[in-house]
Image: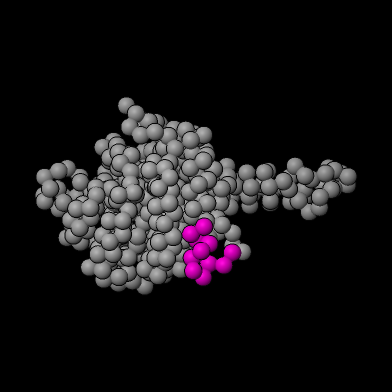
Amino acid sequence: MGVLDVVPAGVLTGDNVRKLFEYAKEHQFAIPAINVTSSSVANAVLEAARDVKSPIIIQVSQGGAAYFAGKGLANDKQQASITGAIAAAHHVRLVAKSYGVPVVMHSDHCAQKLLPWFDGMLKADEEYFAQHQEPLFSSHMLDLSEEPKEENIETCAKYFKRMAPLGLWLEMEIGITGGEEDGVDNTDVDNAKLYTQPEDIWEVYSALSKISPNFSIAAAFGNVHGVYKPGNVKLHPELLNKHQVHAEQKLGKKKPLFLVFHGGSGSTKDEIKTAVQNGVVKMNVDTDTQFAYLAGIRDFVQNKAGYLQTQVGNPEGADKPNKKYYDPRVWVREGEKTLSTRVKEACTDLGNVDRL
Ligand SMILES: [Zn+2]
């Protein structure tokens, strides 16, 4: 029995999201969540998922969403981030079915100061729900990990009460992911906060499970956004097992938590394996796929430099046309290919291969 026996192809919502994550947890694999900034990136991610015959998570960050709508748009009230996230969700909804894979359409980190972005997406979910009896997105992340714990949990619960009836999944963060992403700089954060405690996770679980079972927790276990030199980061994915055991003792149910791994770029295969064994069902990959998208384009531009200086005239002759080199369908495609290869690698690392 594969994933398609449990959930359909296309963007998933409601209990189907939980069924997918339950399936992943039960079969000990996790699904990579890839940040996208354009339809080109989104299509390349879907292509990779189709090729490895597995589900995929597509996500937009606040900055990535604004870019999706266009860098030329004003974003002082999060209007471009709202529009771009909605555009990305509609695009993915339309094409995902053609690729034949289940997709979780997710929005990434939303800190306190970005809540107007969250409100805008939630409004779009409610409008979509009124017409289609399901939300536009599959899932959203609220990241109030910089706020006091009580406030973090309270705000998550408040939003979750509004999200749950629509069939939206909530991902929340407790403890702090180090590093820097989308303008939130946690490079100087106190070390203790980089490791979430089992009691904190239990507090979150108790508050949110009263509302709906459809949520996941991004716990900090020394993970960092971005790629750092090996040795600079002490990742402890084995700590995640403590959270599961602590919750297990309270509930009498094996591995009850759905956990999320932020800052997956640059991790070793062993660290990833341990995280998955401890109930990680989603791992974010952004930095490595950004670099992969560049690599194909960079190599093409370097290797074909003689064909890219003028529209006519190249090393083969002064009157030779260069259209087949400067057409974006040629050089952007090279970035899509190397990105797609990197996504497949992430799928392999997480065991997300041949799962349909
Ligand atoms: Zn993150």
Q: Residue at x 43, y 48 (%)?
A: 128
Q: Residue at x 33, y 43 (%)?
A: 14
Q: Position of residue 265 (x, y in %)?
A: 42, 53
Position of residue 83 in the picture relative to residue 319 (left or right):
left
Q: Quadrant of residue 204?
A: bottom left
Magenta stretch: includes residue 81: yes
Q: Residue at x 38, y 38 (%)?
A: 352
Position of residue 347 in the picture relative to residue 239 (left or right):
right
Q: How many marks?
A: 0
Q: Quadrant of residue 160?
A: bottom left
Q: Residue at x 77, y 44 (%)?
A: 323
Q: Position of residue 132 (x, y in %)?
A: 42, 42
Q: Position of residue 134 (x, y in %)?
A: 38, 44
Magenta stretch: includes residue 7: no
Most distant residue in the right direction:
319
Eyeballing the image, is 112 above or below 227? below
**125 or 273: which is nearer to us?**
125
Q: Is residue 70 visible?
A: yes
In which quadrant of the rendered image does the C terminus lie? top left
Eyeballing the image, is 232 above or below 344? below
What is the basis of the colouring in this image?
A: one colour
Q: Is residue 137 visible?
A: no
**125 or 145: which is nearer to us?**
125
Please report the bounds of the magenta region as a residue range: 73-83
Q: Position of residue 176 (x, y in %)?
A: 32, 64
Q: Quadrant of residue 71?
A: bottom right
Most distant residue in the top direction:
1
In which quadrant of the rendered image does the N terminus lie? top left
Position of residue 109 in the picture relative to residue 319 (left or right):
left
